[in-house]
Image (cartoon, rainbow, N blue to C red):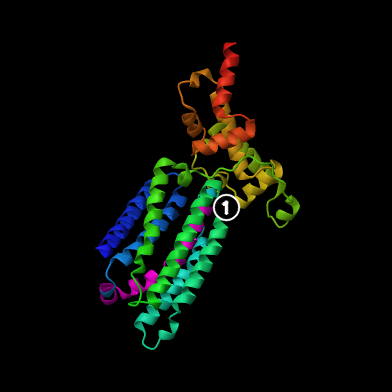
Amino acid sequence: MTHQINIFLLLFGALQGLLLSFWFLKNEKRKTANTYFAFFLIALGLQLTFKVITKAWLMDNVQLGYLLSYKWPYLVAPLLYLYVKSRKDNSFYKKDLLHFIPFAISFITVAVASFVQGANWLYVHPYANAALQIFSLLIYGSLSLRLGNQKLNGFIKVVVAAETIIAITLAVMVVYYGRFPDVRLLFLVLTLLIYWISYKAISKPDLFLEAGTAPVIPMSLDKNRKYAHSSLKPEEATRVERDLQQLMLHDKLYLDSRLTIDVLSSKLATSRHHLSQVLNEKLNKSYVDFICELRLEEAKKRLSEPSNLRFTIAAIALDSGFSAVSSFNEVFKKRYGITPSKFRDQYLNKMSA
């Protein structure tokens, strides 16, 4: 009976992860980040699925898939990091695929050891495999914590802890197979993690979907050293700055919450690196600061107009280019020292006085 309940709980976790991944894939905002997160959820779901299906059936019919199921932490760790990283600029780079090399190596060694006679030496001892997986989780977890915000860092720590438990569980299942109680019960931490993500996605969607807009902070850059080898010529820098100001003044591209530095540099017929250099050297701002300031000024202007009273603050924030109300409230208060709602109230009181 206990065994059946365990399978039931694991199966529901896998199904929930699959459904949740579809939801993130359909969300158009921050598409690259959401795609990484969807694959992250699919990886969790597959981890659960392979522990629901009977081991004997898997060994007879899907041996490679079953053996590979012991390598999933190598896939989960980089997916977590790339999700957190892509929240910053929502861009995909081919070099990011290099993070999947450990998983690819695991796939190749498992395949060769399974189908080539005499290649058993390629098998890694379960404890060594667990140690490598935990090391990978700690490295990618640390990198993710450096990029994540305060709210997201709690989620990152939970994922690393849950996958560490799974890595140890997988090793124990192999070493003590048939001599140990059914430790698949420990996979319930993944089911709990998936349902916790579902709950947060509903109650606090900003946690996973916000653009990660950084507060406006003055930059202190060593410009000469950073761009010492840049090929950007002075006349080209002047042209980019002029076109950038014109583009923002007339087209107001910053109102699109999906705008990225790659999209903007393409419209300016320049490279991402050269655009960053122009922003840093001529405006003393990063791309995020530049766009955020424009959106803040736009929101401030709209909040000051009596004709916009029929719109909520959330609607004004989204129309001004912010993808999340929470990040808008945070940067607005840090910039102007007052919340958007109090700013609107004070302005309206002055108008009525």
- The residue that appears at 34% across and 62% down in the rendered structure is 48
- The residue that appears at 38% across and 63% down in the rendered structure is 186
The image shows residue 311, relative to residue 143, as above or below, that is: above
Can residue 92 be seen from the camera position used here?
no
Residue 142, given in percent of the width and then of the height, sits at 57, 59
Queried whether the magenta region covers residue 58, the answer comes back as yes
In this picture, residue 139 sits left or right of residue 41: right
Residue 245, given in percent of the width and then of the height, sits at 62, 36
Q: How many marks?
A: 1
Q: 17 or 26: which is nearer to us?
A: 17
Q: 182 or 279: which is nearer to us?
A: 182
Residue 128, given in percent of the width and then of the height, sits at 49, 76
Residue topped by disc 1: 147
The image shows residue 28, relative to residue 126, as above or below, that is: above
Queried whether the magenta region covers residue 290, the answer comes back as no
Please rate how many residues cluster around mark 1, counting C-alpha atoms within 10 Å: few if below 14, some from 14 to 19, many from 20: some
Q: Residue 329 appears in which quarter of the rendering?
A: top right
